[in-house]
Image: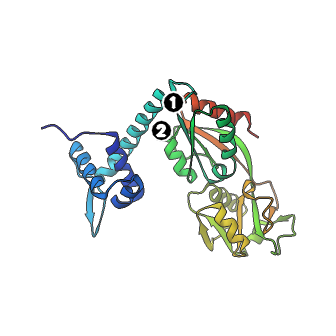
Amino acid sequence: MAKPGLTLHRLELFLAVLDEGGVGRAAKACHISQPAVSEHLQGLGAHFGVPLLERHGRSVRPTPAARLLEPYARQAVGLLRGAERAAADLQGLRSGALTVGASTTPGTYLLPAALGRFHAAHPALALSLQISDTREIERSVAAGQLELGVIGDAPLVTGLAAEPWVKDELVLIVPRGHRFARRRAVTAPAIAGEPYIAREEGSSTRGVAERYLARLGVTLNPVMELGSTEAIREAVAAGLGVALVSRHAVLARDRRIVAARLAGPRWTRDLLIVRRLGTPLGPAAAAFRSLLLETRA
């Protein structure tokens, strides 16, 4: 008896269930019915001869076999998507698509302008920008789901090449009426006495800030964790606390907040361009990387 088919669609649905945390959420994210997702996963499990989901109360969860197959599925999907990009790239830069991944700071404040310049030079290419936290972007690049990423911290995943792109400096932001607002620089211990608002775990901005402060013997316990720099800026403007953010995120026209430097050594980092080692970039990704490197500072 022939095995049920092993298809790219089934592998993508399998990974969506793992990434979204359930069949229902995966169905919603993939715009497909929940029974259809379950049927595809049953077929995939039958192909491999192992169950991929198990009942846990009223919900289902991945089996140990599913977790064992996960890295192979991610690699297979990445390779097949790479093959599709390579086939499209045979048309050069006259057609096709390019998706760039980025962590929040470069994705929100820097890459839109770079993509605008690239679009002006190559208007036939369809461009998209995927923004997530640093760790998620580097995993996607390592798995071959993205050719290029721009992140704010050194990658932890092996097999990636990282190149410096733009210098960044983290600064303290406070409400305009705050006692720190008139200081040119604020010491790290002084921040410890203030309500501290931070990005979520996995954010490179948060990780870099915590490591820097740890070297100075200061540990900050957030009173609030928010999922975007914009939300943090609004919370600070509302007087809910202080925060450490990229200088690129401090808008000159926003008079509700004031940015102050930290006293001591300059607190800088490199925003990095990452790609897979040993995997050549397609023409579109290679051209965009060249554009970024030509404008790095």
- Other-residue count near label 1 (Cα within 10 Å), few / some / many at <14 / 14–19 / ≥20: few
User: x, y (%) of residue 100?
Assistant: 57, 42
User: x, y (%) of residue 264?
Assistant: 82, 59
User: x, y (%) of residue 82?
Assistant: 46, 33
Residues tagged 2 and 1 counted as in contact (Cβ below 8 A): yes
Residue at the (22%, 49%) spot, across then down: 50
Residue at the (24%, 48%) spot, across then down: 45
Q: Nearer the viewer, residue 198 or 154?
A: 198
In this picture, residue 124 sits left or right of residue 8: right
In this picture, residue 7 sits left or right of residue 210: left
Q: Secondary structure at mark 1?
A: loop
Q: Earlier in the sequence, mark 2 or mark 1?
A: 2
Tell which residue pokes out farthest to the left in this image: 1
Give the amino acid type for the residue marked by disc 1 in the picture.
Thr
Which quadrant holds the C terminus? top right
Number of the label disc, if any, that sits on residue 144: 2
User: x, y (%) of residue 219?
Assistant: 66, 67
Q: Which residue is mark 1?
A: 279
Q: Secondary structure at mark 2?
A: loop
- Other-residue count near label 2 (Cα within 10 Å), few / some / many at <14 / 14–19 / ≥20: many
Give the amino acid type for the residue marked by disc 2 in the picture.
Gly
In this picture, residue 191 sits left or right of residue 82: right
Colour scheme: rainbow
With respect to residue 39, does 243 lie above or below? below
* C-alpha separation, residue under disc 2 versus residue under disc 1: 9 Å
Residue at the (39%, 44%) spot, across then down: 71
Dividing the picture into quadrants, the one containing residue 1 is top left
